[in-house]
């Protein structure tokens, strides 16, 4: 393997040489860069900037701070909306919550309540249930078989 040249090497070389020759001819015709700065420009620049900035204090007037009546109207609307919302939002007290629960518990069938208490009862539930019974308790001995009572006692102890 030897050295190889790119396929368009000759064309690029010719274009580069012609561009360099054209650049040299142009430089021979124009002797200056084309850009010039006035004499003493940088020496006077500092003094000119200081003259324009130091010593002259410009007073800028701000808009007078006046309160628009629209801001008062907006504040009044916000207060009115918040108070209306607070006034008409229903609040649930303990008594209404208990009454609500009692109404819903009456709808639930007794079998489901017993099933729930069988699975989710805790140690103190028996005392709470006894307190809720009426003064003359119902005769419940006939409604439960001895196996059901035994099963209940085994699961709750």
Image: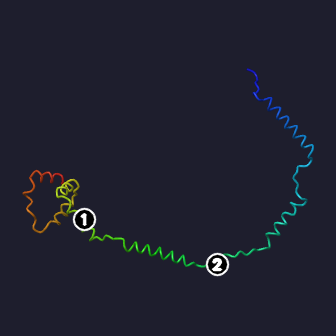
Residue at (21% x, 53% y) in the render: 119
Label 1: element kind:
helix
Q: Position of residue 144 (x, y in %)?
A: 10, 55
Q: Earlier in the sequence, mark 2 or mark 1?
A: 2
Number of on-image labels: 2
Mark 1 and mark 2 in contact (Cβ < 8 Å)? Answer: no
Residue at (15% x, 53% y) in the render: 152
Q: Position of residue 135 (x, y in %)?
A: 12, 69
* 9 and 102: which is toward the camera: 9
Q: Position of residue 17 (x, y in %)?
A: 85, 34
* 125 and 132: which is toward the camera: 132
Quadrant of the rendering where the N terminus is positioned: top right
Pair 2/1: label in front = 2
Residue 126 got which mark?
none
Label 2: element kind:
loop
The residue beneath circle 2 is 64
Residue 50, by quadrant, is bottom right
Mark 1 residue crowding within 10 angstroms, few (<14) / some (14–19) / many (20+):
few
Please determine whether, in this image, residue 156 is positioned above or below residue 63.
above
* Drawn side of residue 126 relative to residue 64, left or right: left
Residue 101 got which mark?
1
């Amino acid at each position: 393997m030897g050295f190889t040249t790119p396929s368009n090497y000759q064309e690029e070389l010719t274009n580069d040489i012609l561009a360099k020759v054209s650049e040299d001819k142009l430089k021979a015709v124009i002797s200056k860069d084309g850009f010039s700065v006035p004499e003493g420009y940088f020496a006077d620049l500092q003094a000119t900037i200081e003259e324009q900035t130091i010593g002259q204090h410009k007073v800028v007037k701000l808009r007078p701070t006046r309160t628009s009546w629209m801001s008062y109207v907006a504040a009044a609307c916000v207060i009115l909306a918040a108070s209306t919302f607070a006034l008409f939002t229903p609040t649930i007290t303990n008594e209404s919550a208990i009454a609500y629960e009692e109404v819903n518990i009456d709808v639930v069938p007794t079998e489901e309540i017993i099933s729930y208490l069988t699975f989710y009862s805790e140690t103190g539930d028996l005392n709470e249930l006894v307190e809720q019974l009426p003064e003359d308790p119902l005769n419940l001995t006939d409604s439960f078989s001895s196996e059901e009572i035994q099963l209940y006692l085994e699961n709750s102890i």
